[in-house]
Image (cartoon, rainbow, N blue to C red):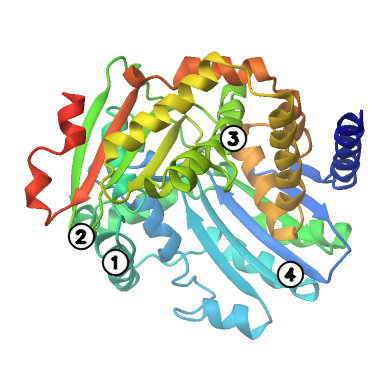
Amino acid sequence: MKKSLIALSSVLMLGGTAHAQKVAFEEYDLANGMHVVLHNDQSAPVVITSVMYHVGSKDENPERTGFAHFFEHLLFEGTENIKRGEWFKIVTGNGGTNNANTSDDRTYYFEVFPSNNLELGLWMESERLMHPVINQIGVDTQNEVVKEEKRLRVDNQPYGSWIAQVKKNLFKNHPYRWATIGSMEHLDAATLEEFQAFNKKFYAPKNAVLVVAGQLDIAKTKEWIEKYFGPIPAGEKPVKQTFVEEPITQQLNARYEDPNIQKPMVVAAYRTPSMKTRDARVLDMISTLLSDGKSSRLYKKIVDEKKMALQLSSFNYSQEDYSSYMIIGIPQGEFTSADLIKEADEEIVKLQTELISENDLLKLKNKYENNYVNGNSSVEGVAENLATYYMLYGDINLINTEIEIYRSITREEIRDIAKKYLNPNQRLILDYVPAKDKADSNESELAKQNK
């Protein structure tokens, strides 16, 4: 009886917290097709101006990969009215911060200012869209910047290439098969005209969503948005291609030698459905159950109790078209990558054949309630969530309603989704090994087992 009361109290408390955190917003379209979302939060005198463009690495020419990420850098070079090298000086000089990031699916830019500098933020983002200066000196400068980033984060970073190797082997047809940072050879070969054409095609009002969040005067904000974004020509909305992958029906095996590591790593990767599906949310919960925290099933068994791995985790890498469910482990001592996969498989079989306890399900839902609250606890988080739900999910209201999906997931669904997607014949096994480990380089134990 006591446990039931505690559980009921937890649900009521979290439900109340979630309700209190409901995000209010207003949305509308400009005449040029640009979608605008406003979120008024008077709790602090800050404001974020952000623009998400529906262009990521999946929209690139296979012979010109890296363009989407390159533009994340290039469009800070300057505009017709912001001199080269002045962008960051203007932002910091007015008490602000700014950044940008790129994924396979979208590119996102934002500035955070004191609320009395909202007009400045809107003007700067409109300048990026309306008056970018894309010239050879900017291209050459950012080419070197991107090369240095790749050297630091990929080429010379221990385990820096594992995600690229997973994508390369898990996808055969879809553009998810190449890394977001792309190929330096492709960027070197590209002409200035190609960069200008990419900008014209994808950086258009109809391919963007503007989100303004924070301490706003709504009427004045709308006036400024119309002033700075309204005159931008509509352009054409890019036509998105559809790429279909054939189901994996037999285990794929791949091997990569990394000169920057001394210990091998193994990755089991399963191709899973779009993040927009209910199945993807169930897989999120499965990854949490298996490896989120020291009490999770895989960590407790393989790392804590059996001391078989230095590190082990799993997660559902959610994307717009397909997702990837991954289990990653680094064996220790005499244990091998094959040992880790065997142990992980045993836990997955348990999920496929036994219902998790009601208490485990409650703990999972509590974690997702907490994630929901934390994800909307800052204006920066709210702004990015609003943009993402509008652009990639096609339902902006998910910022308030997606938690209901997680709340409704059942123990039976967790069992059935594990059975549907997480089978040995539906996955890639990547054997990620030290390049200098020649003793095992030709025939690793994992490779022998997978033959």
Mark 1–mark 2 Cα distance, whole angstroms, equals: 8 Å
Name the secondary structure under disc 1: helix
From the top left corner, tell me how far across and down residue 326 is, in percent: 42, 36
Mark closest to the chain's N terminus, 3 or 4: 4
Mark 3–mark 4 Cα distance, whole angstroms, equals: 45 Å
Mark 4–mark 1 Cα distance, whole angstroms, equals: 31 Å
Mark closest to the chain's N terminus, 1 or 2: 1
Whether 68 is drawn above or below 16: the answer is below
Q: Comparing marks 2 and 4, which lies closer to the viewer?
A: 2
Mark closest to the chain's N terminus, 4 or 1: 4
Which residue is identified by label 1? Answer: 143
User: Number of numbered discs present?
Assistant: 4
Dot label at residue 119: 4
Name the secondary structure under disc 2: helix
Task: Identify the residue shown where x is 27% and y is 17%.
Answer: 250
Q: Nearer the viewer, residue 97 or 38?
A: 97
